[in-house]
Every structure is written in structure tokens, then in C-alpha cells.
């Protein structure tokens, strides 16, 4: 199935030279866990509230031995906590302090920015809002809290990528099909499919190691200030510049 992942997004971008790559308008797609925040929030929930076997469940998912759907089903079956208890733990998760000004910089330049994640939209929205970030499109899995139990929702699942909850590769290609050059930002093994088709890739941790092993051209990064400088060549507004340092 092919779907348009840009409902209501602008078709044209103001012709600012910093907003174009290869004469095409630029769009930025970023992973969340391990990229915008320094840890995996699902693993945090498993560590705090799940059974000991959750560590192996998460490791099997990372190795590609089970799917995202299976990881959520197996792991959350052992989680015994209320939504409020989980959110209290998630509220302590830090965010790269350079990400909010990076969001504003992209808006100033007319560059679409979205989050693509195998994580859960529930906590992504909460952490973004707590850090003053609103209005960024999120392509992720989601959770519905039942009484008892949970229901998991996979609106961006693709049969061609059965191990993934979200086909990041397909979302990158959907932006490209609308005429954008895509800069992708990620850190994990599950980001490799997107990295293989993106026009520019910023990578760290497992994604960087894997890309280097296979000879994929990527740009190492440690924070969003570095990404801003690489994408916009220091041509940033004074307020954003101070916050991105």
C-alpha cells in the first residue's frame, strides 16, 4: 500500500539557498529514541516495570529476531504499572537541548521536519510538549490503554518491512516522491532501511557502526547543533544560534 504521509504539508518552499539540496527542497526526518532523547523509552518502561526477560526480548528485537509487534506484545504483557506511573518515569527523560531551537530553525527556513519512530506516539508527544515542542508531525506506533491491558496501533506498518512497526524507508521515499531531498537522522539498527535511501544521513551509535561496515556514506553527529551547522552552513538566526551552540 502506498500512502501520502504529508497531509496538508506545503508543496513549495520559499527559495532560500540553505533549504535546498541538489536543487530540490529539503525535508528532515528524525528518529526519536536514542536520537532526540538519549535512551530508548520503551526499554526504560521495561526496565522499571517489566519482568527480567524484557531485556532479552528487547535484545532479540534489536537483532532482528522478532518484530516490533512481537516485542510490544511480549514485553508489555509483563508490565504491571498504571499509565500515570509510566508517565512519571518518562517525565524524567531528558531531551537534547538543541532540538527545540533546531525545530524553530527548520520553521524559519521553511524546511519540513517530522519524527519517524518505531516508538510510541503517546510518549513522544508527551516528551516533546514537556520541552515546548509542538506541531511536529509524528509517524510512529501508538498505544491504547485498556482496563486491563493495552492495544497497539501500527498506522505506518508496511508488509514489505514485517519486522518494523513503522516503515521508515517508505516514509523517506514518500517525501522524495513529492520532490524533497531528505536528510535522515538516526541511531539504531532499525534506521538502516531509511538510511539506505535518504539523500543525506546523520548517524551515531549502532547506525553509524553498521553504515561504516557496509560502506554507506553518513555524517557522524552527537547533537542537533552539529546537524544544524551541517545543513544550514551556520546561516542561522541569532537567537537559534546561541541555543544551538
Image (cartoon, helix red, strand yellow):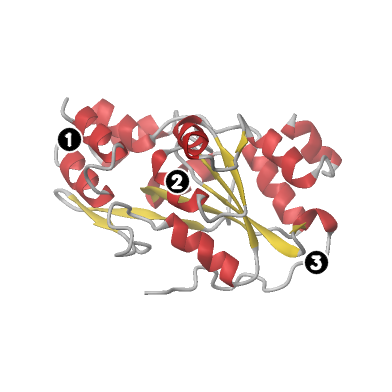
- Closer-to-camera residue (130/72): 72
Dot placed on the residue nearer the N-terminal end, 1 or 3: 3
Residue matched to label 1 = 80
State the CA–CA distance, disc 3 to disc 2: 31 Å
Q: Is residue 200 above or below residue 156?
A: above
Q: Nearer the viewer, mark 1 or mark 3?
A: 3
Q: Is residue 141 above or below residue 58?
A: below
Q: Quadrant of the C terminus?
A: top right
Q: Position of residue 93 (x, y in %)?
A: 45, 30
Dot placed on the residue nearer the N-terminal end, 1 or 2: 1
**How packed is label 1: few (under 14 Cα within 10 Å), some, or many (20 or more)?**
some
Q: Position of residue 239 (x, y in %)?
A: 81, 39
**How packed is label 3: few (under 14 Cα within 10 Å), some, or many (20 or more)?**
few
- Asked if residue 238 lies left or right of residue 156, the reply is right
Dot placed on the residue nearer the N-terminal end, 3 or 2: 3
Q: Which mark is residue 192?
A: 2
Q: Which mark is residue 14?
A: 3
Q: Position of residue 153 (x, y in %)?
A: 29, 59
**How packed is label 2: few (under 14 Cα within 10 Å), some, or many (20 or more)?**
many
Q: Position of residue 190 (x, y in %)?
A: 39, 44
State the CA–CA distance, disc 1 to disc 2: 33 Å
Q: Are marks 3 and 2 in contact (CB under 8 Å)?
A: no
- Asked if residue 100 lies left or right of residue 18, the reply is left
- Closer-to-camera residue (64/29): 64
- Asked if residue 123 lies left or right of residue 179, the reply is left
Residue drawn 63% across the image and 39% down it: 99
- Asked if residue 157 lies left or right of residue 187, the reply is left
- Judging from the image, what secondary structure is the residue with disc 3 in? loop
- Judging from the image, what secondary structure is the residue with disc 1 in? loop
Q: Nearer the viewer, mark 1 or mark 2?
A: 2
Q: Are marks 1 and 3 in contact (CB under 8 Å)?
A: no
Amino acid at each position: 500500500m502506498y500512502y501520502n504521509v504529508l497531509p496538508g504539508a506545503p508543496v513549495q518552499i520559499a527559495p532560500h539557498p540553505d533549504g535546498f539540496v541538489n536543487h530540490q527542497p529539503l525535508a528532515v526526518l528524525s528518529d526519536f529514541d536514542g536520537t532526540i532523547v538519549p535512551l530508548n523509552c520503551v526499554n526504560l518502561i521495561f526496565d522499571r516495570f517489566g519482568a527480567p526477560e524484557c531485556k532479552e526480548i528487547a535484545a532479540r528485537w534489536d537483532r532482528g529476531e522478532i518484530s516490533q509487534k512481537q516485542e510490544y506484545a511480549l514485553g508489555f504483557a509483563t508490565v504491571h504499572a498504571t499509565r500515570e506511573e509510566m508517565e512519571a518515569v518518562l517525565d524524567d527523560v531528558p531531551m537534547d537541548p538543541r532540538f527545540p531551537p533546531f525545530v524553530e530553525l527548520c520553521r524559519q527556513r521553511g524546511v519540513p521536519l517530522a519524527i519517524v519512530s518505531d516508538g510510541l506516539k503517546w510518549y513522544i508527544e508527551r516528551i516533546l510538549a514537556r520541552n515546548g515542542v509542538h506541531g511536529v508531525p509524528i509517524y510512529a506506533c501508538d498505544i491504547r490503554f485498556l482496563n486491563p491491558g493495552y492495544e497497539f496501533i501500527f498506522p505506518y506498518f508496511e508488509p514489505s518491512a514485517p519486522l518494523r512497526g513503522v516503515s521508515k524507508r517508505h516514509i523517506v521515499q514518500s517525501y522524495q516522491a513529492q520532490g524533497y531531498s531528505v536528510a535522515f537522522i538516526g541511531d539504531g539498527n532499525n534506521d538502516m532501511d531509511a538510511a539506505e535511501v535518504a539523500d543525506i544521513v546523520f548517524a551515531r551509535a549502532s547506525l553509524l557502526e553498521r553504515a561504516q561496515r557496509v560502506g554507506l556514506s553518513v555524517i557522524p553527529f552527537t547533537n542537533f547543533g552539529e546537524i544544524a551547522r551541517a545543513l544550514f552552513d551556520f546561516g542561522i538566526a541569532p537567537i537559534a544560534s546561541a541555543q544551538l551552540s
